[in-house]
Amino acid sequence: MILYLMRHANAGTIRENPVLDLKRGLVKEGKEQCMLIARVMGALKAQIDVIVSSPLKRARQTAQLVGTELGYDSQVEISPALGLNASFADFQKMLAKYADRDGVLVVGHNPNMFQFLGRLVTGNGGAAIRMRKGSIARVDMGHHPARLQWLLDPRTARAIYASVTKSSRPKTSRK
């Protein structure tokens, strides 16, 4: 299985009221981050068989926007194993449910996403891997411990995307 772990995109500032914070959706920049990451994933030929999201609005929106841009036509599945208070054991049980899939995209929150990623790639959680909002990691789960193949944040994706879309013509010397 190839596992894509994504932190939800930018949802603005945290609200003091926890009930309101749970309902916080993506801001314009977050929606743009989703589109950009999805385009880069498409360019990298990412094959997604299932998308699983945290129950929170900002993660669901991220999953739906990325899925739509990738041409994913199934329903985004919701799992509390990606919620704010989820444990690594919950996460592992959720992954076991999709063990027969080749490409799985999960969308959640920090600190869970970087902690889960660290535990997957080290086997013991010794790695601290920073995931900015909208970041995505590709992990090959066919090895033990799993292998981190790449990690992209929206800033890096934007720079790559801008550099390859400026001109399709090769530069030539005018000597």
Image (cartoon, rainbow, N blue to C red):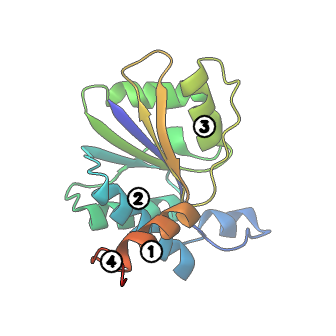
**Measured Cα–Cα span from mark 1 to mark 2:** 23 Å
Q: Residue furthest front?
A: 175
Residue at (38%, 70%) from the top-left corner?
Answer: 164
- Contact, mark 2 vs mark 4 (Cβ under 8 Å): no
Q: Residue furthest bottom?
A: 174
> Which element type, helix, strand or loop, lies under badge 1?
helix
Query: First in sequence: mark 2 or mark 3?
Result: 2
Q: Which residue is mark 2?
A: 63
Q: Is residue 28 visible?
A: yes
Looking at the rendered structure, which numbered label has been put on residue 86?
Answer: 3
Give the foreground label among 1 and 4: 4
- At which x and y percent is residue 50? 28, 45
- Contact, mark 1 vs mark 2 (Cβ under 8 Å): no
**Please, what is the three-letter code of the amino acid marked with disc 4?**
Thr
Q: Nearer the viewer, residue 88 or 18?
A: 88
Residue at (34%, 40%) from the top-left corner?
Answer: 104
Q: Which residue is mark 1?
A: 162
> Which element type, helix, strand or loop, lies under badge 3?
loop
- At which x and y percent is residue 9? 54, 64
> Which element type, helix, strand or loop, lies under badge 2?
helix
**Measured Cα–Cα span from mark 1 to mark 3:** 36 Å
**Measured Cα–Cα span from mark 1 to mark 4:** 20 Å
Give the foreground label among 2 and 4: 4
- At which x and y percent is residue 100? 24, 26
Q: Which residue is mark 4?
A: 172
Give the foreground label among 2 and 3: 2
Report the side of 33 relative to 130 (left or right): left
Q: Quadrant of residue 79?
A: top left
Report the side of 173 relative to 85 (left or right): left
**Please, what is the three-letter code of the amino acid marked with disc 2?**
Ala
